[in-house]
Image (cartoon, coloured by chain):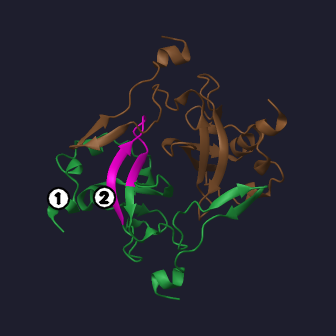
Chain colours: A green, B brown
Amino acid sequence: MTESQATPPAFRESRDWIETIAFDEHGLVPAIAQDATTGRVLMFAWMNREAVEKTAELGEAVYYSRSRQKLWHKGEQSGHTQRVRELRLDCDGDVLLLSIEQHGGIACHTGRESCFYRRLEGGRWQATDEVKKSPGAIYGNG
Amino acid sequence: MTESQATPPAFRESRDWIETIAFDEHGLVPAIAQDATTGRVLMFAWMNREAVEKTAELGEAVYYSRSRQKLWHKGEQSGHTQRVRELRLDCDGDVLLLSIEQHGGIACHTGRESCFYRRLEGGRWQATDEVKKSPGAIYGNG
């Protein structure tokens, strides 16, 4: 893989753009990951400044895990990395939207394509997505 | 407008589904609004329990404004209401995804289709969307 493939040129030239991001009182910004091809919203997570920098450096989504209180290179365990094709910022500068290529076609830790696999139907949350790979098979403890 | 148009049947039958939502320590849940037709992510906001209930009752997006600390029926001033076609919940139960019809084709208070109108290009945030209607014209103070 060449340098230019590893880090999209759009992210490289300067870091001034990070200053525009309005991190919250915990130093975090919400990040929405959307499939670049299908437009499906795959997941929602948080980033701190370092996660944004790492995402830009790697060209792959790096989040901040609030539960584990550390950086989380998405796919580091599962292999389901997310190549970032495009980064967008909202009007208030406090939400990021990532257009991504989802490696393996699975974003959710349950083994589904999207974390948003439950739809409200008749007053109940109904799972609409199949499990493409069991969590045990993904994380090697099944 | 008939009753069935005003309140989608899917939302009516019970309120047990609200108990499944994991509101955060402030009683809020992030909500992502996505255009039902184009798949474009239009905005990101927050809901409290009452906002979720109102959204279900009206069949239109009602958020909770953290800055104004009150319910915010999207479009109440601008007319840019959001008819909710589908409601989804993520794997952890703590993020909502709304599939909506955006009245007027404008979700952003800047008069653009989407709040995510800035794309990172060459180390800068570049506006990619035109202003479809000036905020002055929208809010009647221009």
- Establish whether labels 1 and 2 are both on one chain: yes
Q: Residue at x 46, y 82 (%)?
A: A139
Q: Which residue is mark 1?
A: A4
In the shown orientation, is residue B82 left or right of residue A11? right
Q: Residue B115, labelled with which disc?
A: none
Q: Give residue B54's quadrant in the image.
A: top right
In the shown orientation, is residue A56 left or right of residue A43? left
Quadrant assignment for the N terminus of chain B: top right
Q: Residue at x 60, y 66 (%)?
A: A129
Residue stretch in magenta: A82-99
Q: Secondary structure at mark 2?
A: helix
Tell me if mark 1 has few (under 14), some (14-19) or many (20+) residues whose alpha carbon lies within 10 angstroms of its own.
few
Nearest the camera: A108 or A22?
Answer: A108
Query: Magenta: predominant secondary structure element?
Result: strand
Q: Which chain letter matches label 2?
A: A
Q: Residue at x 79, y 58 (%)?
A: B16
Nearest the camera: B88 or B64?
Answer: B88
Provide residue B85's location: percent of width, then percent of height: 66, 44
Q: Which chain letter matches label 1?
A: A
Of the residues shown, which amino acid type is indicated by label 1?
Ser
Question: Is B130 inside the magenta-drawn segment?
Answer: no
Q: Which residue is mark 2?
A: A55
Q: Secondary structure at mark 1?
A: helix
Nearest the camera: A105 or A108?
Answer: A105
Of the residues shown, which amino acid type is indicated by label 2?
Thr
